[in-house]
Image (spheres, rainbow, N blue to C red):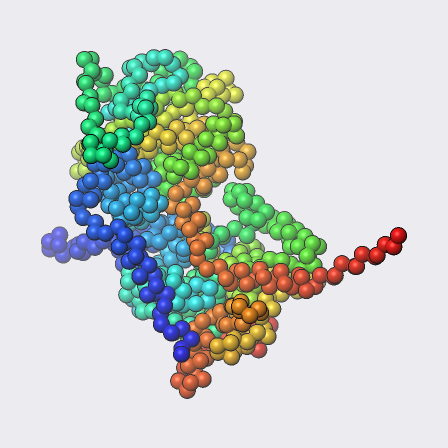
Amino acid sequence: MTIATLTKPWEAFSYGFLDASAKRELRRRMLKAIAVPGCQMPYASREVPMARGWGTGGLQVTLTLLKPSSVVKVIDQGADDSVNAASIRSFLSKVSGAAETWDTLAATLIQSRHRIPEERLRADQVLVLQVPNPEPLRPVEPNMSVARQMHADADYGRLWLILYEQIVRSGRIMQGASYPALVNGRHVMTPSPIPRWDLPKLHMAQHLTFLSAGREKRLYAVPPFTRVDPLVFSDVPYKVEDHAALTCHRSGVTGYFMNEIPQGSGGSVFELSDSHLGIKVIRRAKGEDVALGATWYENGKMPQ
Amino acid sequence: MAYVATRGGERAIEQSERLYRAELGQIDAARIQALREALPMLIDRVMGEASLYEPDLAALALAQAGGDLYEAVLLLRAWRTTQPRLAVAAPVLQEQLFTHRRISAAFKNIPGGQILGPSLDYSHRLLATGVLQGRPFEPAPVEPAADPAPARQPSLAAWQKAQGLVADPPRAEVAPDDIPDLTREPLLFPAARAHTLQSLARADTGGMLALGYSAMRGYGNTHPTVNELRLAEAEVRVRHPRGTEFSAGRVKVSQAEVISKGKSGLLELGFCATLGWNEVKVISGATLDLNAPGAAKGSPVEEEFFLYHTEPVEASGFCIHFKLPHYVTFQSSLDALRGAKAAAVPAPEPEEVTA
């Protein structure tokens, strides 16, 4: 036996970019996050070759989960061809050998910023959401140590209060995206800035969701079949965006979350935010053999 | 026409990067060498913020980023984090430092003497415009002192401790591998002392100056006096697996102690050290450290506030992330806004008053 047989040739970085010690730490935190749904787990958060705030938290979780047989989809605002999504996807495949896809049905691992695909995710898929601010209490308590204590005490009164004040001031809850939700009846989490439309998709879902904030060094999870209840008052029901009746001007599809495109002539047209679902619908209309998955929303409504 | 004609995004980002790099041109070993020689203070600043002491890599990062400091620091940090942690160097005591410059504003003279060393403090800030007209600027040669100061200088704080002016807590003996390492663990509050000092050491110089200056101007609790400012070289002593201790070389370090009369009736010290020579950074950092005990939550001199907000990679990254599309979140807010507008009861028409 020689030393050469015991060592590997020098490489500039490890498989999947992160070194073994970083992956070990992440895996431990991820397991703990699954064990305590919705509870934020601090982690070291290594620097990665992308700027903080550009998906470095999601990236670290994805890099830890990747293997050569993975099929990875990356979306930003619902679109696969968005510049940062394209950049992250090509980095992921470059450092891991994983296959790239735009198709939600084909993906084993989906990293996303601000959207959950419209097609239902399965038990064999993992969703990784990029999180800018992991702290739902930030609007009422910017200090992280104090907020941590409030989570420990399940002290969420001030969050309820701002929702109540919005109703008093504006006649409705004004929270846009990042709607706070109680996970497994214990921890309030921010679901990352996904629209309210997407939040019910996390409730009792078949798939595992990781939410990871690289800059803020916190990750948390929604395991499969876990309750995710938006904070609402019993007499004021949860309201998703009023998009159920909008029709995509390209694919002709109705009943999903849309992007509004202002028109020079005044008014707006709408297009599907889940861009690849739109592509598949158009290709199917042209007679191609394209598989469309079951969607969470049916006829613009989420079945209870 | 398909929904998305081409993979427009991928082509666009590739060409955008090419456009940036075309401006910088070819990067070769000579450019790295020239940067190292011409800009040692900048190299030091980048090495400190990256917490990676390697002047060649720092010069390379600066060359690749075209001088964008935050980009250069990120390049180095992303490289650093993939490298194995081979050994933990022996602690360095102040009196062991190979000292180039050491001054105190607290006393006219101090044991060991005031050593100005290299400094522009008393230079007249005049541009050498002759250079642009073809007359190279040749610095006047240094005249060596007849009686050179010893390279190793005592610590002023040690004298103050002996006088009973400064509290002298017992030194905590921690095994090298048990020293908390900020690059391998999250920063939590109240922070471990090691985490605080590591975090200050790699903080953003400009950010630390802004917050430190706010404390100096009056938003802090105490006024700092520079007890001791030191620019030095530190020997990096590591242990070979066979047990022999040896020097792996020297690194340039700066450190500052600022002092103020504490509530305890003793003098209180604030401390900051960093890799490379960077006086503004360590004086600002030590001022923040001095002001931190007992600071109100949310004040700029509170530890959580200044450590989070002077992290250069995090702060700069989050700032530039606002360039990313946010149209889904915007759409969501717009929906709430329109919903509230539609539901609002129109205000009653004011009754006309007839005179």
Quick one: A237 or B116, which is closer to the camera? Answer: B116
Residue sticking out furthest to the bottom: A287
Q: Residue at x 59, y 66 (%)?
A: A241
Task: Report the quarter where the N terminus of chain B lies.
Answer: bottom left
Relative vertical location of residue B147 with respect to residue B5 in this rendering, above or below: above
Asked whether the viewer can see residue A232, the reply is yes
Residue sticking out furthest to the right: B355
Quick one: A145 or B48, which is closer to the camera? Answer: B48
Q: Is residue A132 left or right of residue A67?
A: right
- Residue A227 position by quadrant: bottom right
Relative vertical location of residue B142 with respect to residue A243 in this rendering, above or below: above
- How many marks on residues? 0
User: Residue A274: image x %, image y %?
Assistant: 47, 70
User: Residue A46: image x %, image y %?
Assistant: 35, 49
Q: Residue at x 44, y 49 (%)?
A: B319
User: Residue A202: image x %, image y %?
Assistant: 52, 65
Asked whether the viewer can see residue B180, the reply is no
Q: Residue at x 31, y 37 (%)?
A: B45
User: Residue B234: image x %, image y %?
Assistant: 25, 29
Residue sticking out furthest to the left: A2
Relative vertical location of residue A36 with respect to residue B6 in this rendering, above or below: above
- Residue B166 position by quadrant: top left
Quick one: B109 or B330, which is closer to the camera? Answer: B330
Q: Residue at x 86, y 54 (%)?
A: B353
